[in-house]
Image (tube, rainbow, N blue to C red):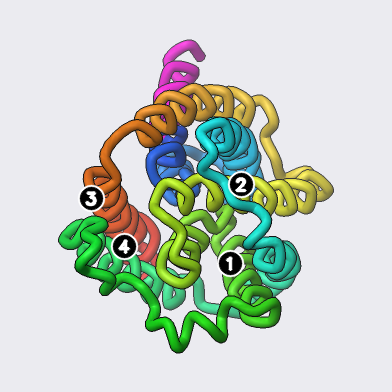
Amino acid sequence: MDYFLIIYIIIGIIVGAITGLTGASGVLILIPIFTTFFNIPLPIVLGTSLLVDVIASGTVSYSYYRAKNINIKEILWIIVGALIGAQIGSYLVVEISRSFILFILAICMVLFGFKMFKTGLSKNNNSLFIPERISIYLKNPIGMIIMGLIIGLATGIFGAGGGLSVFIILYSVLRFDIKKSIGTSSFVMLLTALSGVMGYAENRNIDFRLGIIIGISAAVGGIISSIFANKINEKILARIIGGFFIFFALVMVFLKIIPEF
């Protein structure tokens, strides 16, 4: 039992570190690990992973808030759309090929990751930004609700808080700086994951003991990594995030996509 406890704590710290550095859901790592190496039913894995997301993203969000790197006012309509989309996605998950969606997502993550790793945040290179003529239309309430719906759908379908998709939208469309993108995406992830947790808890598909052990460990890892992220050079941070995007994509391909074919 002590052996497994140590493993859970280590996994939690890694998950938290990923969330604190990138604003991404550590569930992208947690779900493949538990579905591949542990004998835990998938619904419980999803519900427990979302509980970990709530704990980890809550502490990470607070850390970025203290560093003044969260902007809620500009994304209220995105939050509205995300909460609605999360509920819709939970119903669509049985109708859509998860392998196909994950494959498309993995390709997008690799392309975005390579681009961010290569260009960093050079002021002379804005190739990661959506063209201004397009972003203008997406910055109105309707456009932001639609973007939020996409984030929420990703949450419901993949059983994750949608941190990566939030980060891409905040950075590429709304032109948030990288640290504000991470902090704000962590907060949105907290809300969407909490919405998912309530649904899974109703159906008793959460292992609260496991979720709290990993969640507390993730909170510790998240606090440490978010303090580090708030202090380091943004160009270095951009390269770290680019590397994580590529790594997440490879994890999905080898642990979730290939085994299903």
Q: Residues within 10 Å of mark 4 (few under 14, many from 20)?
A: some
Q: Does the magenta run of residues contain 7?
A: yes
Label 3 crowd bin: few (<14), some (14–19), many (20+), radius 10 Å: many
Q: Is residue 219 left or right of residue 164?
A: right
Which amino acid type is marked by label 3? Arg
Q: Which residue is mark 4?
A: 253
> At x 40% / y 35%, what residue is drawn?
230
x%, y% of residue 162? 54, 58
Q: Is residue 216 above or below residue 237?
A: above
Residue 259 in view here:
yes
Mark whose residue sits in front, 4 or 3: 3
Res. 187 mark? 2
Q: Which residues are magenta?
A: 1-14
- 116 vs 153, nearest the viewer: 116
Q: Label 4 is placed on what type of residue?
A: Val
Q: Taken as a whole, is the magenta stretch helix, strand or loop?
A: helix
Which residue is under mark 3? 239
Mark linked to residue 151: 1
Secondary structure beneath label 2: helix
**Label 1 packing within 10 angstroms: few (<14), some (14-19), many (20+):** many
